[in-house]
Image: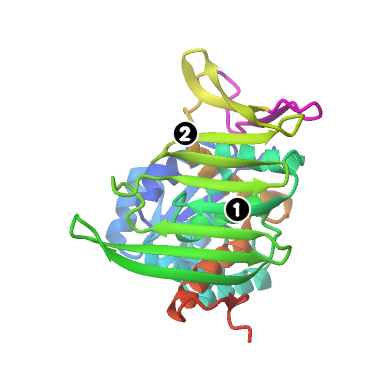
Amino acid sequence: MQANRTRIALIGTAKRATYLYAPLLQWLPDVELVSVWGRSAESAQRLGETLGVPAYTDLDRLKRETAPEIGIVTVSYGANGEVGLMTVEAGLHALLETPIAHDLTDADRIIEVARRQGLKVEVAEQFHRRPLEALKLQLLKSGLFGRVHSSFNDFAGHGYHGVSVMRSYVGFDGVPVRVSGAVADYPLATGNTETQEHGTIWFDGGQLGFYHWTNVGYGSPLRWWRSSRFLAERGMGITVGVGLDVEERLTLLSDDDEAPRFITVERKWERVDGGALTALIAHTGDQVHPVVRWENPFLSEVQGLGPQWHDDEIGVASCIMSIVNAVRNDTDPTYGPVQARLDQEIILAIRASSESGGQPVDLPLGRS
C-alpha cells in the first residue's frame, strides 16, 4: 500500500457523483477526492460545496491547482464520449461512463489519445464485478464447467451492459465475428410503446451468444423477468428472478451422469444477524474443487466500522480500484476501453442487422 493517496477529480455533476462516487471515494483506501468539474459554474459550485472540495469549469486550471491523477467522468448519458475525450486530452488517467462513447469513432479517438499520452483508461462496466457474477466467473475459471458453448442475456442488463454480461461467460478473450439482430416496436396496454432488441452473436471459437432486451425491462410490471444463462460442456448456470430479487441455479453432472448436481451458494455476513457481506461460497460437491470462494475485497479490517456494501457498490468500487491499481502499478485495467468499445460495437451491429432485415453483419463493423 503506497504512502501517498491517489488524487481523484470528478469530471461532471451527474447524480452518480453524489449518491455513488463520492461515498465510495470516502470508503476506499488511499484515494482522495480533490476537486470537481462542471460545465456550468452553478452546478460545479453546488457539487463542490456538497462534497467539500474546490469546483472548476476550466479543466486545465483544475489540473494545475489540484493535481489529480485520475478523472472519474460522471455526466449526462449523451455527453459520455465528448467529456471522456476531453478528460484524456487534459492528460488525466480516466474512469469513463458507460458506454465509452455512443459513436465508435469517438471511442477510437479516446483510445488513441490515451495510448499516445501513456494514460490508463477504465470504463465503469460493473455488472460482471458484482459478487454473484464474480463468483460465477471464478467457477468458470476453475474449469469445473469445462468450455462454455453458449451464453444468454435475458433482460439482465440493457445495451452494452447486457452484451457484457453475455460475453463474460464466454470469456472476454473470445472474439465475436458476426452478429444478426432484430429490433421492433410494439404497442402496450399502458399506452406506451415497447422497443425489443434481440441479437445472435457468433464467436471465432464457435460459441454463440444471445442478447435480449426491452426498453420497459427496468421497473415495469409488464416485463419482470431478469435472467442470464450459460450452457457448458459439464453443466449450466441460470440466474432467475423478478427485478433485483434473483436466485442462482448452478449445476454440474452427477458422478453417474444421470442427474444434475446443484451447487449451493452461501452468503457470509460480518455477524449472524447481518452486517457487511464478507464472502460468497460455492459448495460444488466436486472432489478437486469442493469449494470456490469470493471474498469481499473492500471489507473493513475492524468489524462494523465500514459500510454495508451492497452488490452494486462493490461492482463500482471494483471499477474505481481497477483504474487506481493500473495507475499505481503501471498495469492494464481489468476491463478497459477496448472491451467497452466492443460491447457498444455489438449493440450497433444488432441494430444495423435489423435495419437490413436481419442480415448478418460481420465484425469489426465496416469490414467488407
Segment colored magenta: 284-303
Is disc 2 placed on a helix, strand or loop? loop
- Residue to which mark 2 is pinned: 310
Residue 339 appearing in the image: yes
| Marks 1/2: CA–CA distance | 26 Å
Q: Residue at x 51, y 61 (%)?
A: 63
Side (left or right) of 266 relative to 275:
right
Q: Compare residues 345 and 311 and report the one nearer the observer.
A: 345
Tell which residue pokes out farthest to the top in this image: 272
- Above or below 37: residue 273: above
- Residue to which mark 1 is pinned: 151
- Above or below 162: residue 81: below
Task: Give the x, y percent position of residue 4.
Answer: 64, 42
Task: Give the x, y percent position of residue 19.
Answer: 37, 43
Is disc 1 placed on a helix, strand or loop? strand
Side (left or right) of 12 relative to 336:
left
Magenta stretch mostly in which secondary structure?
loop
- Above or below 290: residue 75: below
Task: Give the x, y percent position of residue 92.
Answer: 57, 62
Q: Compare residues 110 and 165 and report the one nearer the observer.
A: 165
Based on the picture, tell me whether residue 285 belongs to the magenta stretch.
Answer: yes
Which amino acid lies under the numbered mark 1 shown in the image of this protein?
Ser
Viewer-nearest of labels 1 and 2?
1
The answer to which quarter of the image holds residue 82 is bottom left
What colouring method underlies this structural image? rainbow
Q: Mark 1 or mark 2: which comes first in sequence?
A: 1
Q: Compare residues 228 and 91 and report the one nearer the observer.
A: 228
Marker count (numbered): 2
Q: Residue at x 41, y 69 (%)?
A: 183
Q: Residue at x 19, y 55 (%)?
A: 190
Tell which residue pokes out farthest to the bottom in this image: 368
